[in-house]
Amino acid sequence: MTALLILAALLALLLAGVPIAFALGGLGLVLLLLNDVSLIMVPQGLYSAVDNFILLAAPLFILMSNILLKGGVGRDLFAAVQSWVGHWPGGIAVATVISCAIFAAISGSSVATAATIGVVAIPEMIERGYKPHFVYGLLAAGGTLGILIPPSIPMIVLGVVVEESIISLFLAGIVPGLLLASAFIAFSVLYAHFAGGFTPYPRASWGERLRATRRALPTFGLAATIIIGIYMGVFTPTEAAGIGFSLSLLLTVFILRSITWVQIKEAVVESMRTTVTLLLILAGAKVFGKAITLLRIPHDVSHLLATNIDSAAVFVVVVCLVLLLMGFFLEALAMTLIMAPVLYPALMPLGIDPIWFGVVFVIMIECALITPPVGLNLFVIQSIAKTDLMQVIRGAWPFIIIMITTIALLYLVPDLALYIPFKL
């Protein structure tokens, strides 16, 4: 009962427009006061939340994605992929998904992925006769690949919050991310085949393909360096973020020469704002987490679930339904910080692998990014396309079904997520 009252109070604060950081931190402070707990742990919690070497990867990846966004890397990437697959049935849609997957492997950000590829792909697809709602839904969903295919900023936050290996989470996301991208591609091809109405893109000559690929080759190299470096153990996620940022500067300033110093300054300022917001939310969540832990709420919820649910399948279904409903009201980071500490203690009694569950959790967060009324990617695409939000929502729902189907497949074949981190 206490847990429900606290959750209701938190939702009320968020729906009232209180910023997430202050809603979490303020409610945590009130709970500590009501239970006569020493408040010395509040400044300690605020400090320990941000004093984390692994967490340093998040602002570096944010800065890198903003540099790439300002440098127009998405244009070259999309042009290269389109030159190879653009003439296929639904080829531009396929190129869009592949471009999103590649950029996701560089930036780790769903918003940056949707914005970078959307700016280029939306006008191209609309001009070729693709139905607008399909285009908007495809870009909104394609952008979510940025938090599943490593590196992933939400996976970094999840790993820090539940104290799981971030490298294992990264590696576990590779195959599900590629599987989800493949499912998006298959749906796009089938949609193009049955819906029709679009103008096929002419087949590019070998010369055009080579020129486009040559210009995008450094971008491919950047993605490969980050993923292979992490997988081979050459560097940690934090070191990978630092190397990725350095390479993104080298790419946009000296190789492509596509970014100005004014744009670099804008990228730094925007990254600073995002980072401060992220760290404030994490600090507030740390105080809230200490409060509910002292009240034994995670333990009680875990015991309740273990007592009433004795099947891993039922547990996963219930959790997915809860996260899907919460995605209507909370954005991705808030869901991670509120739900992960409560759900993770229940995994061990049910025999659920925490890394596997982390991948499922992130896929459900992807759904939250494209479900109204607070789906962030919906607003990103609406802003880029300057269209009605209902058009974007209408195009996004088939991709939510694809994501949920992917979770079912992961349950049936857990090695899709666990083979690379633990068996390869």
Image (cartoon, rainbow, N blue to C red):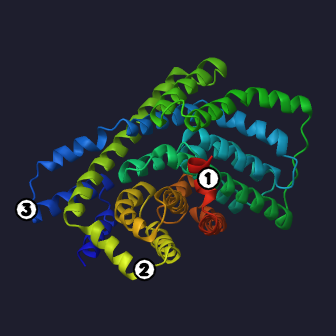
Q: Which residue is mark 3?
A: 36
- Give me the C-alpha separation between circle 1 and circle 3: 47 Å
Looking at the image, is mark 3 or mark 2 earlier in the sequence? 3
Q: Secondary structure at mark 2?
A: loop
Residue 68: quarter of image: top right
Q: Amino acid at mark 1?
A: Tyr
Judge from the rendering whether residue 262 lies leftward or rightward of residue 414; answer left or right: left
Looking at the image, is mark 1 or mark 2 earlier in the sequence? 2
Residue at 53%, 61% in the rendered image? 360
- Give the farthest residue toward the top: 254
Q: Amino acid at mark 2?
A: Ile
Q: Amino acid at mark 3?
A: Asp
Q: Quadrant of the N terminus?
A: bottom left
Q: Categorize mark 3 by other alpha carbons within 10 Å: few (<14), some (14-19), many (20+).
A: few
Q: Which residue is mark 2?
A: 309
Q: Categorize mark 2 by other alpha carbons within 10 Å: few (<14), some (14-19), many (20+).
A: some
